[in-house]
Every structure is written in structure tokens, then in C-alpha cells.
Image (cartoon, rainbow, N blue to C red):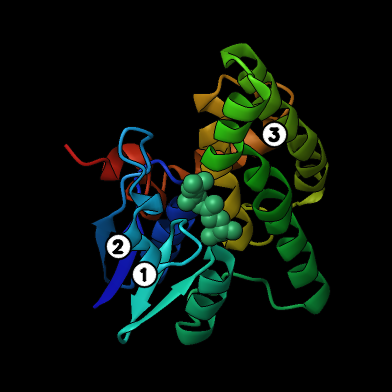
Amino acid sequence: MIKLYDYWRSSACFRLRIGFNLKGIAYESEVVNLHPDFSEQLGASYKAINPQQRVPAVEIDGQVFSQSMAILDWMDEAYPSPAFLPKAPLDRLRARAFAETVACDIHPLNNISILGYLREVFGADKDAIGAWYATWIIRGFEALEVHARQSKTDFLFGDQPGLAEICLIPQVYNARRFNVDLAPYDRLVEIDAKCMELEAFQNAAPEAVKPD
Ligand SMILES: N[C@@H](CCC(=O)N[C@@H](CS)C(=O)NCC(=O)O)C(=O)O
């Protein structure tokens, strides 16, 4: 059985939960509590599992791997159907670029450790943190909305959701959580709504997996 080191509110874990569900891959979750009162990711026992002290990590055949994008690549290689990427090389490039705008350019700037550093080292208050958080989402979503409007298929890069949606939907969740105004991003909101009609996305959502 594949084990996912998981936290309900982590958007990188949310990506993997969607991926596992879309592929129909069984997995079990082991919670790593990122809440600042616990910060289990920083403890010695989790550090021994993932030296980078972040979630997700997955254990496959007794080996542990990190980095959600690399794990999604593995998932798509090991379980090719349904495919996460379109077939044509330039369409694949477009879909990857869309996904990486979230995974490389938006998400890392808004991570717990970054927000903590802004608070502790630069004395940022709640409003400043909120403004920082929104800034990087808006910068990214402005570009993603342009790309999303160019797509003429049901989902972003075809008639089924793939890597682009796997990255986008958790980021839309985060945007709502931090009250970012999504009104300018009609097509992103439409894609989010379409995805959230699907069980693979519903069952992966933070509120669906939140421990009692
Ligand atoms: N690039 C990594 C990012 C992983 C990551 O930063 N995860 C966050 C949760 S979404 C985390 O563990 N943060 C803990 C911290 O910042 O201390 C991936 O895609 O897996």
C-alpha cells in the first residue's frame, strides 16, 4: 500500500490526493500536522522520513519520495490511464507551463515557513501577510486566466482534467481561504466548478479529509 504523508490543508498534498483519486490508486494517509501549534514537519521523526521537512512525501515499496510534481510524473508514468497530459508535445508543454506557474511561482511564496519568516523576522502583521499572499496569487492568476481563456476544450487542455487542474484547484481553494477576489478570473472559477463536480476532486478536498 502506498503511504501519503499528508496534511488536510496542504495544497501540495491536495494535488496528490486528486492525482491518486483520478488514477484510482489506493493509498493510506499518515497525518503530519503542520498547524503551528504542532509543526510536526519540523520534528526529528519526520525529518528522518523527509529531510526537507515538508509534505507531501510518499512511501512506495518501502522507499520515500518527496516533491508533489515529481510524484505526479511518477503516477502518470506508472499508471498511464487516464493521462494527466494531452498527447501533442506543444499541448503538453502548455499544460506543464500552466501547472508550474502554480507550483513554482505562486505556491512557494505563500508557504507556511515563508509566512512565518515574514512575521517573525520582518514583523509583518495579519494585514501585511494577507496582502503578500494575495499579491502572488493575483500575479499568477492574471496570467493563468489569459491562458485559460485561450483553451476551447471542456477542461483546460482537453476533455478531462489533468496536471493543470490538479495544480489549479488547490490554489483556488487557498485564494478563497485568504479572501482573494476571484471575480476577474471567470474561466479559472468555471474550471474550478467543473472539477469540483467530480468525485476525484471532492474526495480530495481539505474539508473531505480533515481529521475530526
Ligand atoms: N515543492 C514542494 C512543496 C512542498 C511544501 O512546501 N509543502 C508545504 C505544505 S503545502 C509544507 O510542507 N510546508 C511546511 C513548512 O513550510 O514548514 C512540493 O510540491 O511537494
Instruction: Tell whether 111 sits left or right of 33.
Output: right
Could you tell which of marks 3 and 2 lies nearer the N-terminus?
Answer: 2
- Where residue 99 sits: x, y (%)? 67, 57
Residue 28 vs residue 119, the one in the foreground: 119
Specify few, some or many for label 2: CA neighbours under 10 Å numbering under 14, 14-19, or 20 or more.
few
The N terminus sits in image quarter: bottom left
In the rendered structure, are the residues bearing label 2 and label 1 in contact, judged by CB atoms less than 8 Å apart? yes
**Front in this rendered view, residue 101 or 127:** 127
Is the residue 202 above or below the residue 2 in the image?
A: above
Q: Position of residue 75 (x, y in %)?
A: 48, 77
Which residue carries the number 2 mark?
Answer: 45
Q: Mark 2 near ligand 1 (CB under 8 Å)? A: no
Residue depicted at x 61% and y 39%: 114
**Residue depicted at 43% across the width and 54% down the height:** 13
- Identity, as a three-letter code, of the amino acid under mark 2: Ser
- Residue 14 makes an appearance in the image: yes
Q: In the image, which disc is placed on residue 137?
A: 3
